[in-house]
Amino acid sequence: MKVKQIKLKNFRNYTEQTIEIASGTNVFVGENAQGKTNILEAIYLCTCARSHRTGKDNDLIKDGADYYQVEIQFESDNAEQNIKQSFHESKPFIEEIKIEYKKFPMIERNIYYCGFKQERISDLIGLFHAVIFAPEDVMLIKEGPAGRRRFLDLLISQIKPLYFRNLQLYQQYLKQRNNLLKTLRNMKFDKKKNSDVYDSEIYKFNLLQLTIWTEHLAKISAQIISTRYKYILEIEKYAIEALEKISDGKEKFKINYKTVSGIDPKLDSNQIYDSLMQRFERQLDDDIERGSTGSGSHRDDLELIVDDNLLKERGSQGQQRSAVLALKLAELQIIEKETNQKPVLLLDDVMSELDAKRRTHLLSAFEDNQVFITCTDLGQIYPEYKKKLSDKQNSSDMENIEKENEHNLESNLNRSYINFFKVREGTVKRQYLL
């Protein structure tokens, strides 16, 4: 996949900005708090309609504005190939995703693909693929299970949109079940406090409803667990290979899937469903007493282990960074394998966090992908280019390359070159090598 253009309106610190993007590596250089990360955030937003930094759309609106708009134009490898085969076109087929959110006259979020409104977020998932690697990703290891589930769920959702729909259904069923559990708990409390207000028939009816919602929840949960287990094995395989390269074969990676106690994720979904129903039956009284569902795939976790040490508890800073890097490289490979698309790679100020060996491995791992990199100092990535950028083009090399690529699509798809941009106070300006 190749992003061709980015348009921002009232997004973070950008009032209105259009950025023309070329193939290869795109480097955004600037001091902190100038808007570099916001560009990568906007691109990633178009993969899943969610920022990697916040779950609140209001946080994305520029101060003083009442809406934001993000739009990207991109080439999809498969779509481009299909258009060529069908219509013998010489020009690539350009796709477009636009996301807008406004607060007035009413709160509204709209998503468009090639001008057509998408009614659900699940309609967006899988249209555009991007992998982001940011300093805060080390929290995958340091913090609780929610972040690790989110990493896994977003990866699978990009590949399997139906999985994303199952996650949505699971949350709906879980909410219904928890509401009924609270109702039953309150009815039992009322029975003890004042038996005159207790109605045994209503209690039985609520128990019957609970059984129905529990069956729905168990069925969806079984599919989620089965799918998660399959992809965890894939992630582990590629992460093992990546970490071996990063550590020169000195470190071994392992991932353990922690799901509902007593559930074997290797079983098929029907067998997992039966086990879940038995589990829910055994914990029914505890769930009613608690007023919520005590176990389920909403509590799943991943144990990340290097050399038999649980990284969260005993991993060094270097091991934790290496493990996250290995996970991201695994994510990149899995998406490409499953979709036949090369995802766009977004590297948000991570080079300063990596030593020279890890930087070299990272840069060599995605030679054929379009890459967006942010940094405060160009010397962190390309020492030979430090202090050699200018607003003015001193040679016709880049212009010649772009003209050549307009007439040679294969060259455009395979060529990898570097493009530079200066970011300052919410303004992006193309830079050229001296």
Image: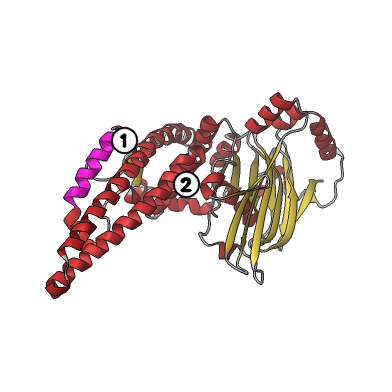
> In the image, what residue occupies the spot 52% across and 59% down?
54
Q: Magenta residues: mostly which secondary structure? A: helix
> Of 385 and 332, which appears nearest the observer?
332
Residue at numbered disc 2: 321
For residue 145, say whether it is visible. Answer: no
- Against 124, residue 8 (above or below) is below
User: What is the quadrant of residue 236 in the picture?
Assistant: top left
Which quarter of the figure is the N terminus placed in?
top right
Residue 353 to residue 332: above or below:
below
Badge 1 crowding class, 10 Å Cα cut-off, few under 14, some 14 to 19, many 20 or more, is: many
Instruction: Report the amino acid beneath label 2.
Output: Arg
Q: Residue at x 53, y 57 (%)?
A: 53
As for residue 276 lying within the magenta part, the answer is yes
Q: Residue at x 19, y 44 (%)?
A: 278
Residue 294 magenta-highlighted: no
Q: Nearer the viewer, residue 397 or 333?
A: 333
Give the mark count.
2
* Secondary-structure class at tag 2: helix
Q: Amino acid at mark 1?
A: Ser
- Residue under pointer 1: 269
N-terminal label among 2 and 1: 1
Return the mark for residue 331: none
